[in-house]
Amino acid sequence: MTENLTPLCQINGGCMGCCGHDFISREKIKEAIRLNTIEFENKSPRVKAQFLSFRDRAHPSDLRHGVCRNLIEKDGNIFCPLHPTLHDKDLRENHCDIKHLCGTARKFAEWDSEKQEKFISFVASKNIDNLEYSMGMDSGKLLEEFENKH
């Protein structure tokens, strides 16, 4: 296994594949993220306690249209404001299944850096938005298409 150069959840505007279940439709996903973002902005998290208060406002299984209530959007990017890439600690701990990796991410982690870069380039060449990227990662569709071409 190699060290990933870029976490897959951070490319293509962010992946939310593991942040939801039963994605109903693009419209419902967008609406859920829009409402989550409003709630996040209303909390105005600046310190750890405020981030935790935002996190704990809903139980992890209390999804909005199949999407985690902590998933937000900013500048066209979908992300979790609790993610360890944004803090010195993983604020999702004891709330989310932080060890979860979709099948695509598990496979990606096994590849050498050259194959990882080819996959990242493949995704970029698809010119898809972050919702289609997320659903393709979660379902394994992008992995299957990549493996069929390489």
Image (spheres, helix red, strand yellow):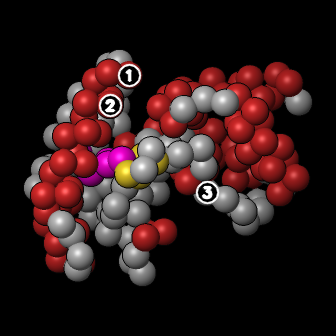
Label 3 packing within 10 angstroms: few (<14), some (14-19), many (20+): some
Q: Is residue 125 visible?
A: yes
Residue 86 - label: none
Horizontal and vertical percent position of residue 117: 81, 50
Cα–Cα gap, marks 2 and 3 = 23 Å
Instruction: Identify which residue is drawn at 32% across, 31% down.
Output: 30
Q: Mark 1 highlights which residue? A: 26
The magenta stretch is 69-73
Instruction: Report the amino acid beneath label 2.
Output: Lys
**In the picture shown, does residue 148 fall above or below 124?**
above
Instruction: Report the amino acid beneath label 3.
Output: Pro
Q: Nearer the viewer, residue 127 or 135?
A: 127
SS for callout 2 = helix
Horizontal and vertical percent position of residue 73: 36, 47
Examine the residues drawn in magenta and state their main secondary structure. loop
Q: Mark 3 highlights which residue? A: 7
Instruction: Identify which residue is drawn at 83% across, 57% down.
Output: 113
Q: Which is nearer the N-term, disc 2 or disc 3?
A: 3
Instruction: Report the amino acid beneath label 1.
Output: Arg
Q: Is residue 34 left or right of residue 102?
A: left
Q: Mark 2 highlights which residue? A: 30
Q: Nearer the viewer, residue 38 or 5?
A: 38
